[in-house]
Image: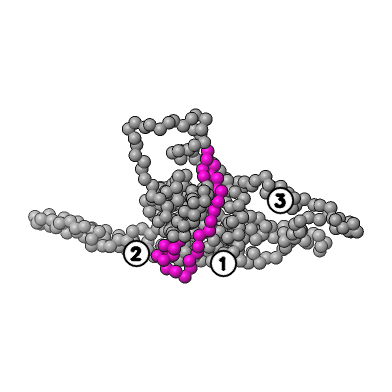
């Protein structure tokens, strides 16, 4: 499977955090006051914005379009400066669907190390600041994304970010890019591997508090802006005998896709909602089965302890020595409480599919009422 392989490969290739030794008498020069806010040596300035270069947007769009499914993912390269994470480059990671986990992990790790080494040789940006992931209908909650982002937040300077690209929105003409990072409360529960019911309550975790969104903006140079403005600006036709309707032309032909009132997208969206609900019910059934097993084992252990106490009380009343207390955990194998993380992620998928359905259905209704009004029916 490619999903766990990506997280394992990143964990193997990224440098492990090491505590820097504290010199007794530092000899380096102090940072000037004018640069103390821009040069964030200790990563103390929190991230306030993610800035994507136009070339990165183009690469992600191209990779997502050419990928066979929503498995397009890759690394983001750049630099954090004065609270702004500037993403200046990216490259795609291979997707191995037919190989086993160990072989795929080694292959992705070698490819990533080779790409970073090549970028360093040509003086390109080789500082990993996060990764991107393609998704459909806004449902990006999955275990692979969580594991990969957790690795980044443990090993990168500012923890890195994940850029989520919704290919279904792009197909409708709206390029969707969002930046996220894991919340501190979720990271604390993740490090402790404590996703039991009590752990979720103590950390106040729900599917909406797993990730926090960071404002994102796109940066393009002046030359590209001028070129885009030239494409959309109407120009006078060079033909002298052109009709009035054809007197002005544009390099980009008009698009009427927004007027399409087809419901093919709604059908797929409804199928995804139904599938996500079925998966959630299956997971809840598994959790309920494990909870019943735990309750039965605890009841057996409590019954045994109660009988032993009664027997010791009778022996003491008869003047006999009480029986030694035994370790209940050795006599009864009480399984640990099941993790509720998968249930939270499935609820996040259901919520994302429902919001996408609401948006698409609302837009479709507006188009249908508009078509009805214009036809005079």
Q: Position of residue 166 (x, y in %)?
A: 59, 57
Q: In this orientation, does residue 201 appear? A: no
Q: Position of residue 262 (x, y in %)?
A: 70, 65
- Residue position marked by numbered label 3 in the rendering: 228
Cα separation, mark 3 vs mark 1, equals 29 Å
Q: Is residue 215 above or below residue 142?
A: above
Image mark count: 3
Q: Is residue 75 left or right of residue 268?
A: left
The image quadrant of residue 338 is: bottom left
- Residue position marked by numbered label 1 in the rendering: 68
| Residue at the (77%, 61%) spot, across then down | 371
Label 1 or label 2, whichever comes before in sequence order: 1
Mark 1 or mark 2: which is in front? Answer: 1
Q: Position of residue 257 (x, y in %)?
A: 72, 61
- Residue position marked by numbered label 2 in the rendering: 293
Residue stretch rendered in magenta on the structure: 79-108
Q: Residues within 10 Å of mark 1 (few under 14, many from 20)?
A: few
| Residue at the (42%, 59%) spot, across then down | 8
| Residue at the (17%, 59%) spot, across then down | 311
Please tell me which residue lies in front, 177 or 281.
Answer: 177
Residue 305 in magenta? no
| Tag 3 near tag 2, CB within 8 Å | no
């Amino acid at each position: 499977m490619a999903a766990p392989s990506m997280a394992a490969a990143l964990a193997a290739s990224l440098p492990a955090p090491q505590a820097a030794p504290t010199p007794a008498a530092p000899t380096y020069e102090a940072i000037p006051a004018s640069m103390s806010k821009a040069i964030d040596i200790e990563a103390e300035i929190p991230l306030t914005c993610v800035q994507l270069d136009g070339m990165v947007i183009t690469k992600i769009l191209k990779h997502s379009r050419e990928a066979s499914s929503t498995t397009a993912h890759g690394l983001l390269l750049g630099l954090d400066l004065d609270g702004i994470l500037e993403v200046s480059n990216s490259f795609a990671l291979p997707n191995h669907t037919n190989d086993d986990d160990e072989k795929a992990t080694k292959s992705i790790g070698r490819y990533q190390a080779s790409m970073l080494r090549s970028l360093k040789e040509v003086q390109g940006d080789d500082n990993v600041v996060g990764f991107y992931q393609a998704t459909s209908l806004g449902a990006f909650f999955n275990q692979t994304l969580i594991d990969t982002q957790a690795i980044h937040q443990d090993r990168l300077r500012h923890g890195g970010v994940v850029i989520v690209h919704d290919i279904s929105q792009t197909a409708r003409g709206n390029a969707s890019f969002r930046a996220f990072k894991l919340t501190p409360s979720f990271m604390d529960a993740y490090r402790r591997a404590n996703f039991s019911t009590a752990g979720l309550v103590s950390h106040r975790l729900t599917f909406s508090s797993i990730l926090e969104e960071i404002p994102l903006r796109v940066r393009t140079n002046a030359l590209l802006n001028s070129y885009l403005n030239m494409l959309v600006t109407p120009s006078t036709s060079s033909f002298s005998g052109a009709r009035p309707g054809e007197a002005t032309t544009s390099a980009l032909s008009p698009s009427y896709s927004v007027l399409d009132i087809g419901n093919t997208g709604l059908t797929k969206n409804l199928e995804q909602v139904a599938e996500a609900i079925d998966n959630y019910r299956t997971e809840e059934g598994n959790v309920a089965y494990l909870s019943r097993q735990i309750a039965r084992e605890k009841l057996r252990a409590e019954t045994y302890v109660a009988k032993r106490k009664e027997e010791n009380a009778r022996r003491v009343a008869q003047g006999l020595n009480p029986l030694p207390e035994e370790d209940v955990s050795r006599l009864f194998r009480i399984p640990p409480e099941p993790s509720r993380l998968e249930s939270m992620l499935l609820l996040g998928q259901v919520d994302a599919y429902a919001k996408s359905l609401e948006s698409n259905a609302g837009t479709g209704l507006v188009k249908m009422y508009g078509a009805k009004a214009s036809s005079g029916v």
